[in-house]
Amino acid sequence: MSYSNMSFILYFILVSAILISTTNYVDAKRSLSKAEEDDIEKQLKILNKKPVKTIMTKIGDIIDCIDIYKQPAFDHPLLKDHKLQLASSVIPGVIANTNNQSFSIFRGLQKEGCPPGTVPIRRTTRDDLVNAKQFTKKIRPFYANNISSNTNRDYHFVAIEEAIVRRKYYGALSSMSAHDLTVYPGEFSTSQIWIVNGPTNEINAIEFGLIHDPSLFRDSRARLYGSWTVDGHRSTGCQNMLCRGFVQISSTVTFGQEFRPSIYGREAHQNHFMVNLKDGNWWLNVGPYAHAMEPIGYWPGVLFNHLNGSASIVRHGGFVGKTSRGSFPPMGNGHLPQTDDYFKTAFMSQMKYIDEARVWLDIDPRSTEIKKSAPMDCYDIKFAGNLGEYWGMTMVYGGPGGPTCG
């Protein structure tokens, strides 16, 4: 067989696999009931407010600039009397970013922001809401298992946390490397922090970091991600701005923006993520350095019944999901973790939390506990310890995934 014929056959097999994966996901979307379709139309009217300005990014995202006081969050029944908070206060050891340095980690809205008094919100489509329902169905068993085990074969996770009973957390911080991954429709892969409180049937959780989700974004780029729930995603909460809840205040950075990826073996692009509790609200901050982060917005404390005072768990790690017939996607940078060359591994450094005195502290290496649900040749995680002032408490994680990881 000639080389050209062999190449064509391999190409045909690859394209067929992608189409099959995509078709399986589309079929799931078509099974909606009339009631679900009506609900989606209602949600679209609520979420897509009349824009003051519309921006089309280079990668095809439509960003609407919405009056900050008319954003979807304020349509939530619990936020009718909510007073907009415009800035989070400085936390010891963290300096607020006032020079838009966060642009150095993003691609998308660098040259064009929203007018004063407006905030950027990615326009929501019908497919976004349908795919969000599929995403929620995938992660619901994760919370039903109290985020500690895996009896569902459609997702896997690796994570590190402090195993300290009755400790209260008021925030979490980590610097994450961003990477290009090949992720297909119906799959997702995250690098994230979990902030959790509450019993199994009432788990309150905030998740934030970066996500690869082509079903939502129509590509597998690393995007800014956040989600919340008050019942383990059984009936509340959502990703990003796909429901009412998160209050956006930044005029330049919004959920779904693309991160600059690392270059394997040459460059490691780090992105600092922080959520801190201030005046009862959980503030999301993102930037290139721990001392130069921009407040993106906040999840109002009134949304929660167990996270309205503190968290009982802070967890750093990765999370992946697939379609029932598909293969597991890569995690991290797609390679198993190693500590010999940090240009060739996915990592989280400067892993910290805020204590009751509102002071940043390193996670305690003596009490860290590793949790993982997959075979080591699929995904793994290693705690590297304290690597000095610049890196701080660091862990490496990730893996290639594949069809045999179930």
Image (tube, grey):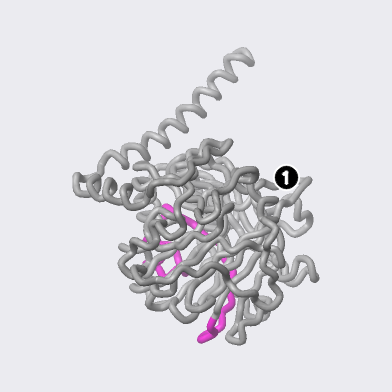
- Residue 204 part of the magenta segment: no
Q: Nearer the viewer, residue 41 or 164?
A: 41
Q: Name the residue under label 1.
A: 264
Residue 371: name its quadrant.
bottom right
Q: Nearer the viewer, residue 50 or 23?
A: 50
Q: Is residue 84 placed above or below 21 in the rendered structure? A: below
Q: Where is residue 341 in the image (x, y as percent from the top left)?
A: 78, 54
Residue plotted at (57% across, 40% down): 182
Q: Where is residue 71 in the image (x, y as percent from the top left)?
A: 41, 57
Q: Is residue 231 placed above or below 361 in the rendered structure? A: above
Q: Can residue 141 be seen in this view?
A: no
The stretch of residues the image draws in magenta is: 140-168
Residue plotted at (72% across, 44% down): 263
Residue 308: name its quadrant.
bottom left
Residue plotted at (78% across, 66% down): 390
Q: Is mark 1 on a helix, strand or loop?
A: loop
Tell me the kind of residue under disc 1.
Tyr
Position of the N terminus, as image quadrant, is: top right
Q: Is residue 196 visible?
A: yes
